[in-house]
Amino acid sequence: MDENKTVEVPAPSEVEVPSKFKKLVEEVEAMTVLELSELVKVLEKKFGVSAAAVAVAGPAAAGAPAEEGKSTSDVELTDAGASKIAVIKVVKEALALGLKEAKDLVDGVPSMLKQGMKKEDAAELAKKLTDAGAKVTLK
């Protein structure tokens, strides 16, 4: 990836930044894409959240009471189904793997794809896989 790629950001007139966040927003605007990616990873680890889950759940999840029981799930591929290529594509994309690694996981059914995922993320991955024709077990 090229570090010097620019990302189109809305003009300042389109987004009103509260004064208490002005300095922080200016620092973020000056960062490269790789630096922003690294910052997101650090914040995810620091606060134990996923950027994707925050974007979907929003503030409503923050006010919800703590969920009873297990809050994580494991995703196991139990059958690749008829359209193995589509399943390989989903596994490759979802787990950020190379084509060979994704194919090996799909060919080696049953195979544990990811462990310790948040329930919402695990359900989303399972839905993508079942939509592609695979059979998945959440544990």
Image (tube, rainbow, N blue to C red):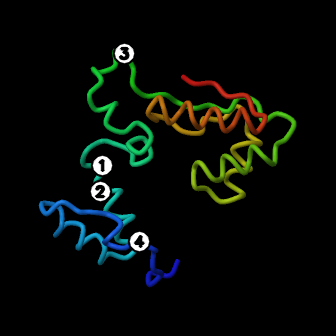
Relative to 121, is 38 on the left or the right? left
State the image coordinates of residue 30 (x, y, percent, origin top left): 29, 78
Q: Earlier in the sequence, mark 1 or mark 4?
A: 4
Which residue in the protein does label 2 denote?
Answer: 42
State the image coordinates of residue 93 (x, y, percent, origin top left): 63, 53
Q: Is residue 29 above or below residue 65?
A: below
Mark 4 → mark 2, Cα distance in angstroms: 22 Å
Q: Is residue 19 above or below residue 93?
A: below
Relative to 23, is 75 on the left or the right? right
Who is closer to the viewer here, 90 or 20? 20
State the image coordinates of residue 21 (x, y, percent, origin top left): 17, 61
Q: Earlier in the sequence, mark 4 or mark 3?
A: 4
Tag 4: residue type?
Val
Q: Splitting the image into 4 quarters, where does residue 63 fall?
A: top left
Mark 1 → mark 4, Cα distance in angstroms: 26 Å
Relative to 138, is 129 on the left or the right? right
Which residue in the protein does label 1 denote?
Answer: 45
Q: What secondary structure is found at the residue carrying circle 4?
A: loop
Q: Nearer the viewer, mark 4 or mark 2?
A: 4
- Quadrant in which the C terminus appears: top right
Q: Nearer the viewer, mark 1 or mark 4?
A: 4
